[in-house]
Amino acid sequence: MSQNSPPAHGRPGTDAANREEQSTWDAKAFYNKLAPTKKPKTPNPQNAITIAVSSRALFRMEEEQKIYEEHGVEEYVKYQLEHEDEPFEPGAAFPFVKALEAVNTRLRELYPESEELFDVVLMTNHHAQVGVRLINTINHYRGRSLIGYLKAYHTNLYLSSDPGKVGEALGEGIAAATIFSPDKVEEVSDTQLRVAFDGDAVLFSDESEQIVKAHGLDKFFEHEKEHENSPLAHGPLKGFLEALGKLQKKFYAKGQRLECPIRTYLVTARSAASSGARALKTLRSWGLETDEALFLAGAPKGPLLEKIRPHIFFDDQMFHVEGATEMGTVSAHVPYGVAQRYKKSAAKKEPAGGK
């Protein structure tokens, strides 16, 4: 009997059972043949660039969430168990995570023993019974804050569809954003990770935003010119750009600058002529760079992002996020800085029935 053949029971009247067992055995043998003999090395969280993604950001779970809200946890769990063999549809963060894995593949080829890789951690507060359906779930939590886990994993970025959890993470100094999926799906690269950032209140502090809100654009331009050589303080996602830059340099060290599978973009409403210099000099003072710096002087960001086709775009202003998603870009809102306080203040002043 060959090593890959099923055991022969030889009992009479069991032809159907034997055929079923043969089919199962063949499927297992086929899977074993395809499966790698050596699993990729799991990076140590202290050395990895950890990206924490909520299950609702990674997968489309709108129907399940509706059942939970309308019928409660028992019906929700029942539905999940009945459909556990049906994979979720990809969500907003899915192409981004696929691109992270593509970068890891390239890094492992160049540095087989390195633990400086992206480590994707799936975070969910769903009932544990749902875990079977959440492929590649690493942790499941219910009824408790995720902040301790995010810190334990040395999280470099947390993506969620829950603004409350994102705000909690940012309040604890963890880079975080609320992710939104576009109505239309634009094709993105599956071999090159592309990440686009707004500047103020995302990569940089909201110092300049405060000047705009308090004194207007003219005073802002005057302030930026006066402080051109004074670096801006860092914003909530500065560390994530720094982590991307660290991995980029690993490719550069192997002579693969032009073939680097990570590309970063600064996409800002600043004007290059009047206020762009300070942004670029700030990045230089940090020892960082972006592959492209795009200064739009207040023009809409959506059309340009449609050309770039990043896997994700980060902005602190919801109208930029909404404009980008309308044009097919997966975007993430960073609820940080004076613009958020200004928005809340305006909402309080709005009369009843206002839009």
Image (cartoon, helix red, strand yellow):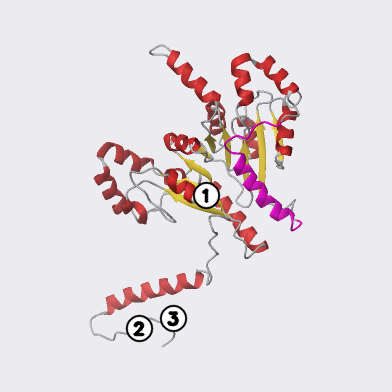
The question of residue 246 being in magenta is answered with: yes
Side (left or right) of 322 relative to 270: left
Image quarter of the C terminus: top left
Q: Which of marks 1 and 3 is in front?
A: 1
Q: In which quarter of the image is residue 339?
A: top right
Q: Position of residue 314 (x, y in %)?
A: 57, 36
Vertical relation: 354 (above or below) 177: above
Amino acid at circle 3: Asn
Helix, strand or loop under label 1 = loop
Question: The residue under label 2 is which amino acid type?
Answer: Pro
Q: Which dot marks residue 154?
A: 1
- Residue at the spot of label 3: 4
Instruction: Find the magenta span and give its range.
Output: 231-255
Write down the residue under mark 2: 7
Query: Where residue 278 sits: x, y (%)?
Result: 73, 29
Q: Quadrant of residue 253?
A: bottom right
In terms of depth relative to the viewer, which is nearer, 220 or 62?
Answer: 220
